[in-house]
């Protein structure tokens, strides 16, 4: 089964590399400023001479900046897409008579609506990822301030998830649940 949060490894690796580079640059600049390192002369110009570099150097720098900018934009867009990849599921009992296809996202809409109607749940989001042979369900449940995550989890495991497995004709459905807490209070009766 693939990871349900695909960009997390890349993010951690890139953040670690950038962090080490920035710390090293900061230590180098501080040590040079305090004259603990005598690598650079404080009175010397930063670059030798005042003449412009050849034109091709400017084009290479501009091209590199564009590529770096596009890579950073791609990285930013990857942060917005935190949902696992979904597929269309095929139900084929008799291929001669045709087949039935169902979008995996459409399968969890009633499940999500039922979960949102549960006591103590402020919001819910579900993603059914993987193929029919290797399904995975990722849930993000936002609990109201006075909601009880234990009761919500019990209701999920005892009532809601078994109905979803039955509707999808699955024996097993691996689930990851992320609970978030809201500042909203549930409806109260006086």
Image: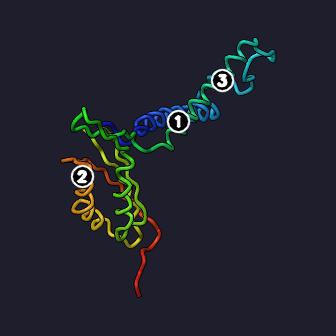
Measured Cα–Cα span from mark 1 to mark 2 = 35 Å
The label on residue 165 is 2
Observer-nearest of 171 and 158: 171
Residue at (47, 68) in percent of width and height: 183
Observer-nearest of 18 and 117: 117
Q: Nearer the viewer, mark 3 or mark 1?
A: 1
Contact between labelled residues 2 and 3, with CB atoms less than 8 Å apart:
no
Q: Quadrant of the N terminus?
A: top left
User: Looking at the image, is 12 positioned above or below residue 140?
Assistant: above
**Residue 138 pos. (x, y %):** 34, 49
Contact between labelled residues 2 and 1, with CB atoms less than 8 Å apart:
no
Residue at (26, 49) in percent of width and height: 168
The label on residue 75 is 1
Q: Secondary structure at mark 2?
A: helix
- Specify which label sits upstream in the sequence, 3 or 1: 3
* Disc 1 crowd, CA 10 A, few/some/many (<14, 14-19, 20+): some
The residue beneath circle 3 is 40
């Amino acid at each position: 089964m693939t990871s349900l949060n695909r960009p997390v490894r890349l993010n951690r690796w890139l953040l670690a590399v950038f962090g080490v580079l920035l710390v090293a640059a900061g230590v180098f600049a501080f040590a040079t400023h305090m004259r603990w390192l005598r690598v650079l002369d404080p009175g010397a110009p930063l670059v030798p001479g005042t003449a412009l570099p050849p034109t091709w150097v400017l084009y290479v720098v501009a091209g590199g900046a564009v590529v770096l900018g596009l890579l950073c934009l791609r990285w930013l867009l990857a942060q917005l897409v935190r949902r696992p990849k979904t597929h269309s599921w095929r139900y084929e009992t008799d291929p001669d008579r045709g087949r039935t296809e169902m979008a995996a996202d459409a399968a969890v809409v009633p499940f999500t609506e039922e979960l949102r109607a549960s006591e103590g749940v402020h919001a819910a989001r579900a993603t059914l990822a993987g193929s029919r042979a290797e399904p995975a369900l990722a849930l993000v449940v936002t609990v109201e301030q006075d909601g009880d995550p234990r009761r919500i989890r019990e209701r999920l495991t005892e009532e809601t998830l078994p109905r979803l497995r039955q509707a999808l004709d699955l024996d097993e459905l691996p689930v990851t649940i992320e609970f978030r807490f809201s500042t909203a209070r549930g409806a109260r009766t006086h």
